[in-house]
Amino acid sequence: MSDCHWTAMGRLFGYPECCITDFMRRVRGDMTFQEMKEENASFHGKPWGNTGFIPCRTCRPDAEKDFVAFVAERITPNRKYDKPFPEDDYT
Ligand SMILES: [Zn+2]
């Protein structure tokens, strides 16, 4: 998939631009080994676990502190998809 596609999907789902940028670095393989380790660790036992969304390093502390509030403030107002987060069964 193209960069453009992923960016469009992120915006459709209302994800913050900084998190989309971070995601793009991941799919392009532009992250350092240390960043990748942190990314991988950030999937396990976190409130965003299987949502398909991964907050960037900057957003991660806020998202971890109160993920419901993070979604309400940073994702829901920008979301263009017609189903509530974390539904993303776009195909
Ligand atoms: Zn972010």
Image (tube, rainbow, N blue to C red):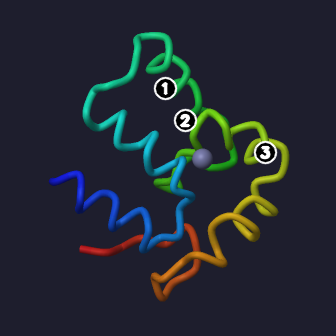
Residue under the image location 66 percent in, 37 percent down: 58
Given contact means CB atoms under 8 Å apart, are the residues at marks 3 and 1 in contact? no
* Crowd around label 3: few <14 · some 14–19 · many ≥20 (10 Å): few
- The residue tagged 3 is 62
Q: How many marks?
A: 3
Q: Does any atom of ligand 1 lie closer than 8 Å to the CB of label 3?
A: no
**Residue displayed at 55% across by 35% down:** 43
For disc 1, the marked residue is: 40
User: Does 80 appear above or below 87?
Assistant: below
Quadrant location, the N terminus: bottom left
Check if mark 1's residue and mark 2's residue have beta carbons within 8 Å.
yes
Which residue, given by chain and number where applicable, does mark 2 sit on?
Answer: 43
In percent of width and height, residue 77 lies at: 66, 78
Residue type at the position of mark 3:
Asp
Give the numbered dot on residue 22. none
**Front of the two marks 3 and 1:** 3
Residue type for callout 2: Phe
Q: CA distance from mark 1 to mark 2?
A: 6 Å
SS type, badge 3 = helix
Image quarter of the C terminus: bottom left
- The residue carrying mark 2 has its beta carbon less than 8 Å from ligand 1: no
- In space, the residues marked 2 and 3 are separated at their CA atoms by 15 Å
Q: Quadrant of residue 90?
A: bottom left
Name the kind of residue labelled 1 in the image.
Answer: Asn
Give the spatial CA distance, label 3 vs label 1.
18 Å
